[in-house]
Amino acid sequence: MKYAYDEFYFPAIPILQIRLSTPEWNLQTTDLPAIVDTGADATLVPLKYLLDIEATIGGRNRLRSQWGERREVNLYLVDLEIEQAILPGIWVIGDELSDEVILGRNVLNRLRLLLDGPAGKTTLYE
């Protein structure tokens, strides 16, 4: 499946459409645009989406931003769906400060992706 880069950003940025779910509650989000960030260690999800699906809190951890600031964050356990693929048991950070989903390497390392910058397309392989 191919996804066009989001040209709202400059330069344009690779985006995948995802859904988050909590099977124990049978709840899931609508499709959410998620920024592909190969430099992020972890996946960040706006807290409002995690509260909507009643995601389980799995503890706290420390987050260090790209600017070096550190803060305490909650970890949540969710299933993450991209196309027909379901990645079960993904730990994500509940982000109280942003409204963007950031896909970090804890998810990206489970996928086969081609980021084609000149064409402005991301290809997800099965």
Image: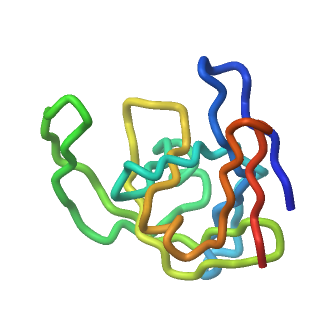
Looking at the rendered image, the quarter that the C terminus falls into is bottom right
Q: How is the image coloured?
A: rainbow
Above or below: residue 27 compared with residue 5: below
Q: Is residue 104 left or right of residue 60?
A: right
- Could you tell me residue 7's position as x and y percent? 73, 23
| Relative side of 66 to 122, left or right | left
Rendered location of residue 120, percent (x, y): 76, 37
In the image, is residue 3 above or below residue 7?
A: below
Horizontal arrangement in the rendering, residue 56 relative to residue 15 (left or right): left
Among all residues in the image, which is located at the extreme front?
Answer: 118
Q: Position of residue 40 (x, y in %)?
A: 37, 50
Look at 20% across and 29% down and name the residue there: 67
Q: Is residue 86 left or right of residue 108?
A: right
Which quarter of the figure has residue 80?
bottom right
Residue 79: percent from the left, percent from the top?
Answer: 59, 74
Query: In percent of the image, x 69 and y 78: which residue is there?
Result: 86
